[in-house]
């Protein structure tokens, strides 16, 4: 079975109903979003909505095409609509910060946010990309603590402190001596 973009949809049985995992929508549905510009290329709603349904969560994940001009209103909407939160992608990762109530330690260090959580009207910004990547490496048996490495697409670290020469950077990652750099090893 495929969706409107010809992406395969997993067929499963949920509470006695056969068919694609689509979850349900009602007055208790928790709304979560993704704000970016452009956004129409993303497959995030398919992935997240299937995950909600498979886990038995009454949630809906929607995309919102939000550029810098619409950002203040979009952040207000998270509170107004009592959304649980939103993911944030380019070009809004840095621009969203002034509209939030709090930032976690990693977002403060990176000066970027990719996740907003709404706790009863208090919006907290988080940066989860780098930590998720490091956890995956650790789970795979790789330990980068105290070492420097190079990333091919350092979006998580894009706004970091610059050193050595223009266009280069090296930044300490939380944990025992971890660094990330866009310079070769050595």
Image (cartoon, rainbow, N blue to C red):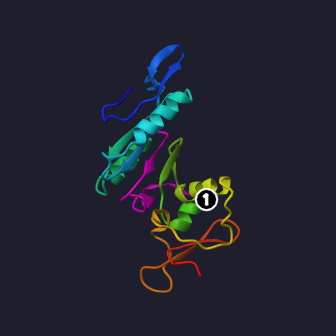
Compared with 104, 184 (above or below) is below
Q: Residue at x 30, y 32 (%)?
A: 4
Q: Residue at x 47, y 38 (%)?
A: 48
Kindly indicate the quadrant of the structure image that contains residue 172.
bottom right
Which of 82 and 144 lies nearest the eye of the viewer? 144
On the rendered image, what quadrant is the N terminus found in? top left
Which of 4 and 102 lies nearest the eye of the viewer? 4
Q: Residue at x 43, y 52 (%)?
A: 88
Kindly indicate the quadrant of the structure image that contains residue 80.
top left
Which of 149 and 44 lies nearest the eye of the viewer? 149
Location of residue 35 in the rendering, given as x and y in whole percent from the top left corner: 38, 49
* Residue 45 seen: yes
123 lies left or right of 77:
right
Q: Residue at x 34, y 53 (%)?
A: 71
* Residue 57 seen: no
Compared with 61, 169 (above or below) is below
136 lies left or right of 39:
right
Q: Which residues are magenta?
A: 83-104
Location of residue 161 in the rendering, given as x and y in whole percent from the top left corner: 50, 76
Compared with 82, 180 (above or below) is below
4 lies left or right of 81:
left
| Mark 1 residue element | helix
For mark 1, does the 10 Å Cα neighbourhood hold few (<14), some (14 to 19), or many (20 or more) residues? some
Location of residue 17 in the rendering, given as x and y in whole percent from the top left corner: 48, 15
Residue wearing tag 1: 134
């Amino acid at each position: 079975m495929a969706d409107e973009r010809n992406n395969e949809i997993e067929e499963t049985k949920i509470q006695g109903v056969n068919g694609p995992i689509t979850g349900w929508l009602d007055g208790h549905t928790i709304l979560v979003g993704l704000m970016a510009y452009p956004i129409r290329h993303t497959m995030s709603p398919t992935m997240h909505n299937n995950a909600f349904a498979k886990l038995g969560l009454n949630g809906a994940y929607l995309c919102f095409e939000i550029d810098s001009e619409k950002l203040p209103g979009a952040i207000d909407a998270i509170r107004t609509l009592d959304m649980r939160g939103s993911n944030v992608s380019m070009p809004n990762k840095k621009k969203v910060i002034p509209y939030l109530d709090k930032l976690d330690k990693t977002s403060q260090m990176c000066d970027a946010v990719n996740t907003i959580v709404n706790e009863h009207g208090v919006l907290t910004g988080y940066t989860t990309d780098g930590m998720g990547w490091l956890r995956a490496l650790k789970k795979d048996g790789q330990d980068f603590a105290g070492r420097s490495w190079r990333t091919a697409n350092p979006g998580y670290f894009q706004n970091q402190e610059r050193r050595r020469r223009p266009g280069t950077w090296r930044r300490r990652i939380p944990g025992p001596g971890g660094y990330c750099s866009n310079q070769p090893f050595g």
